[in-house]
């Protein structure tokens, strides 16, 4: 069976009263629809090209600012950060914590041997203790599967001591 071709009626020739011959074209809905689609595609293309040429201004990113205007913690506080023998964690030890301190927030930041910035955050509730020790993993764990960061040679440590009377801060960079 041959492919069906649309049947297009031939133009009609009409003689006018003045003797001129006029050609009356039939209104083909397929032709009108095709022309309409072509116009829409062209307009869409123009809009896309104009939008591609616009310079996109990125939205300002809100920076997480670390409070550096906090007073330093009392000089009697002793802070130590020691690497675990396998290099997969460090032990944070704080002693002589000022009385009235409710919690200590910690932030460790470091760079891996692949040049990736990494870190760890946490909060330790003191419950009246004047000294604490906490092991902090250098990596991530999910569903009992851990991935450790390698090549860590230095860690920047920031501690925030929170008390009802206010907060104070300790900062130091440790070489491992």
Image (tube, rainbow, N blue to C red):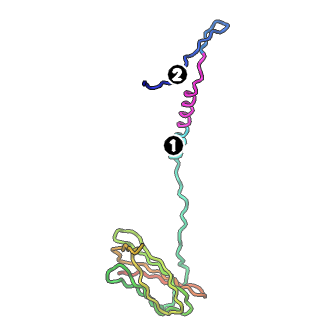
Image disc number at residue 49: 1
Give the percent coordinates (x, y) of residue 30: 55, 28
Q: Is residue 167 left or right of residue 143?
A: right
- Marks 1 and 2: in contact by CB < 8 Å? no
Q: Is residue 46 left or right of residue 115?
A: right
* Residue designated by label 2: 7
Q: Quadrant of residue 44?
A: top right
Residue beneath the point at 43% across and 78% down: 156
The span from disc 2 to disc 1 (Cα, nearest Å) is 38 Å
Q: Nearer the viewer, mark 2 or mark 1?
A: 2
Compare residues 49 and 139 and report the one nearer the observer: 139
| Vertical position of residue 84 compared to residue 96: above or below | above
Give the percent coordinates (x, y) of residue 166: 59, 85
**Residue 33 painted magenta:** yes
| Vertical position of residue 58 compared to residue 89: above or below | above
Q: Quadrant of residue 21?
A: top right
Residue beneath the point at 53% across and 90% down: 127
Secondary element at tag 2: loop
Residue beneath the point at 55% across and 79% down: 69
Which of pointers 2 and 1 lies earlier in the amino acid sequence?
2
Q: Is residue 37 left or right of residue 119?
A: right
Which quarter shows the N terminus?
Answer: top left
The 10 Å Cα crowd at callout 1, few under 14, some 14 to 19, many 20 or more, is few
Secondary element at tag 1: helix
- Please provide the residue range marked out in magenta: 24-42
């Amino acid at each position: 069976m041959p492919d069906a071709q649309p049947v297009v009626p031939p133009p009609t020739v009409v003689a006018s009263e003045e003797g001129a011959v006029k050609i009356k074209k039939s209104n083909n809905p397929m032709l009108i629809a095709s022309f309409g689609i072509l116009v829409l595609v062209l307009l869409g293309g123009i809009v896309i090209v104009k939008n591609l040429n616009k310079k996109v201004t990125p939205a300002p990113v809100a920076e997480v600012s670390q409070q550096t205007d906090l007073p330093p913690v009392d000089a009697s506080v002793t802070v130590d950060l020691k690497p675990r023998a396998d290099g997969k964690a460090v032990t944070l030890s704080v002693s002589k914590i000022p009385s009235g301190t409710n919690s200590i927030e910690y932030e460790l930041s470091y760079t891996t041997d692949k040049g990736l910035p990494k870190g760890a955050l946490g909060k330790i509730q003191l419950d009246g203790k004047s000294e604490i020790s906490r092991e902090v993993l250098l990596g991530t764990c999910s569903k009992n599967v851990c991935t450790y960061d390698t090549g860590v040679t230095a860690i920047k440590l920031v501690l925030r001591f929170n008390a009802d009377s206010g907060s104070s801060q300790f900062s130091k960079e440790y070489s491992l």
